[in-house]
Image: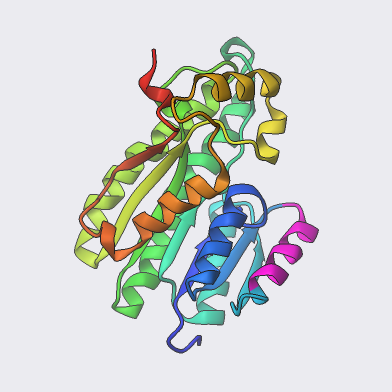
Amino acid sequence: MSGERKVALVTGGSRGIGRVIARDLAEQGYDLVINFLRNRTAAKEAAAELEAKGARVLLVKANVGDVNKIKEMFAEIDNTFGRLDILVNNAASGVLRPLMELEESHWDWTMDINSKALLFCAQEAAKLMMKSGEGGKIVSISSLGSIRVLDNYTAVGVSKAALEALTRYLAVELAPYNIVVNAVSGGAVDTDALKHFPNRDELLRDAAERTPAGRIVTPEDLSNAVMFLLSDKAWMIRGQTLIVDGGLSLLS
């Protein structure tokens, strides 16, 4: 048991946006569960950074697109900490191809990790949040492709739209259990994930030139929004997707 310290799970928390969110949570006094899929070295580096901030850290390797792996992960969380207060549904993947080149395997992989994972992680997280009697908070990371058409982004964009719709349903159905559910959607952020985009340089250049705020979004910008939604100040915000893009989506 972790005593009085609260516990947060960040899926995909070893790199990029997830790692910044995990760092900010550690600085707020949370113990952390960091989920990762492939890069154990990055996960260990993240854990060391968090432990240096006083957090107790549990690393869990699991493909969140696999429901059995999700259940095993939450059983490990329960055994280690006996509670969960926050779920940050950050892990994401997807096949970046034109619509006419998408295959069933591409669709299934993208939807499983970006959409299905939220449903079944939220179910398991809610059970632990109810167990503590204190409720909890769930925030997912989306992207502008959920409401805008981006090149090569069909599968990911649709999966993120599903994530945002699921956020609304979860917010209503989990509200009686004192669980607050929201999402944060970001514009183009220069992380490792963006390196997989065939038009990465064009995306970043276009975003920097067109964003009214004068620069592209950083992982810290998204983490700041997540921290707000996880705070008690956002208690009456339910089922919403907060767009953090410097105003880019306001332009035609």
**Percent coordinates x, y for residue 182 in the rendering:** 34, 49
Residue 60 left/right relative to 83: right
How many dots with numbers?
0
Residue 198 left/right relative to 76: right
Residue 169 left/right relative to 32: left
Q: Can you name the residue that lies furthest to the right here? A: 41
The answer to whether any part of residue 159 appears in the image is yes
**Percent coordinates x, y for residue 87 in the rendering:** 45, 60
On screen, residue 133 above or below 117: below
On screen, residue 86 above or below 98: below
**Percent coordinates x, y for residue 237 in the rendering:** 24, 51
**Percent coordinates x, y for residue 31 in the rendering:** 53, 75
Give the position of the C terminus as an image quadrant: top left
Q: Residue at x 69, y 63 (%)?
A: 46
| Residue 48 position by quadrant | bottom right
The answer to whether any part of residue 72 appears in the image is no
Q: Can you name the residue that lies furthest to the front here? A: 214
On screen, residue 11 above or below 59: above
| Residue 204 position by quadrant | top right
Residue closer to the observer: 163 or 70? 163
Stretch in magenta: 38-50
Q: Residue at x 44, y 48 (%)?
A: 140
Residue closer to the observer: 200 or 138? 200
On screen, residue 80 above or below 157: below
Residue closer to the observer: 88 or 206? 206
- In the rendered image, residue 236 lying in the magenta stretch gets the answer no
Q: Residue at x 41, y 39 (%)?
A: 163
Q: Can you name the residue that lies furthest to the top here? A: 100
Residue closer to the observer: 74 or 153? 153
- In the rendered image, residue 40 lying in the magenta stretch gets the answer yes
